[in-house]
């Protein structure tokens, strides 16, 4: 059985939550999103900006790419997949930014044409705040609407929201690994 067939079979056999349960799960997911972001920011605050573009020997990534990728991914999971693209999103996540940091993109160490760490942090924060605003106004019925991968636990919009903190923790781990390869001490 192929991976997509296995995912499809698994998704069709999952019992979906009720609207009331989905609302409760959303509340927990929001707290997990906040926890994940606080940990990521703790790692980033302890990383000198002049090392954000360094790709350590033996690793395929750098801090700048991780931050840009988290920004694009969180936009996709909490905003685009939940309420669709809106005109103001082009300012928040322009096409060139998606190309530079989306799935399948390649980290670069050359600062030419790349946002500064300050710009990356500012955009990361704007997407985070905007994403939380979307979640605060989402209806339980909307949470139950079906979506395609990526998601966690349920093939519905709630599943994309549940995946968001898991995804951020994966990349926080990568940020931690890059920091150690740069010779920096762990934060915890």
Image (tube, rainbow, N blue to C red):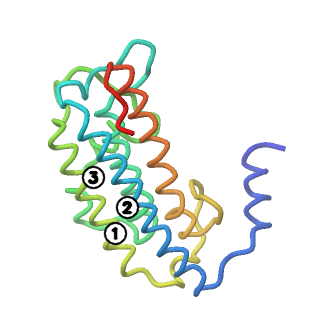
Q: Secondary structure at mark 2?
A: helix
Answer with left or right where residue 156 lies relative to residue 90: right
* Disc 3 to disc 2, C-alpha distance: 21 Å
Question: Mark 3 or mark 2, which has the lower sequence index?
Answer: 2
| Above or below, 168 relative to 151 | above
The number of callouts visible is 3
Give the residue at mark 2.
34
Q: Are marks 1 and 2 in contact (CB under 8 Å)?
A: yes
Answer with left or right where residue 186 lies relative to residue 149: left
| Above or below, 143 relative to 121 | below
* Disc 1 to disc 3, C-alpha distance: 16 Å
Answer with left or right where residue 23 lies relative to residue 64: right
Point 33% across, 53% down: residue: 38
Q: Few, some or many C-alpha atoms within 10 Å of disc 1 (few <14, some 14-19, many ≥20)?
A: some
| Above or below, 135 relative to 121 | below
Towards the viewer: 173 or 110:
173
The disc placed on residue 93 is: 3
Give percent across and percent down for residue 87.
25, 66
Name the residue at the right extreme: 1
Q: Few, some or many C-alpha atoms within 10 Å of disc 2 (few <14, some 14-19, many ≥20)?
A: some
Question: Mark 1 or mark 2, which has the lower sequence index?
Answer: 2
Give percent across and percent down for residue 93.
27, 52
Question: Mark 1 or mark 3, which has the lower sequence index?
Answer: 3
* Disc 1 to disc 2, C-alpha distance: 9 Å
Give the residue at mark 1.
132
The disc placed on residue 16 is: none
Image quarter in which the C terminus is found = top left
Point 46% across, 37% down: residue: 173
């Amino acid at each position: 059985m192929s991976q997509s067939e296995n995912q499809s079979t698994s998704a069709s056999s999952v019992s979906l939550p009720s609207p009331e349960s989905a609302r409760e799960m959303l509340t927990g997911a929001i707290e997990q999103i906040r926890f994940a972001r606080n940990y990521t920011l703790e790692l980033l605050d302890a990383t000198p900006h002049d090392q954000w573009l360094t790709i350590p020997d033996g690793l395929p990534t750098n801090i700048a790419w991780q931050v840009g990728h988290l920004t694009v991914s969180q936009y996709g999971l909490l905003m685009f997949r939940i309420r669709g693209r809106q005109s103001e999103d082009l300012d928040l996540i322009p096409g060139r930014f998606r190309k530079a940091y989306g799935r399948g993109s390649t980290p670069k160490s050359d600062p030419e044409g790349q946002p500064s760490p300050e710009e990356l942090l500012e955009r990361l924060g704007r997407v985070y705040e905007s994403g939380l605003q979307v979640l605060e106004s989402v209806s339980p019925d909307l949470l139950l609407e079906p979506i395609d991968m990526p998601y966690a636990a349920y093939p519905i919009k709630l599943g994309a929201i549940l995946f968001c903190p898991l995804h951020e923790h994966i990349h926080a781990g990568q940020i931690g690994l890059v920091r150690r390869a740069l010779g920096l001490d762990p934060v915890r």
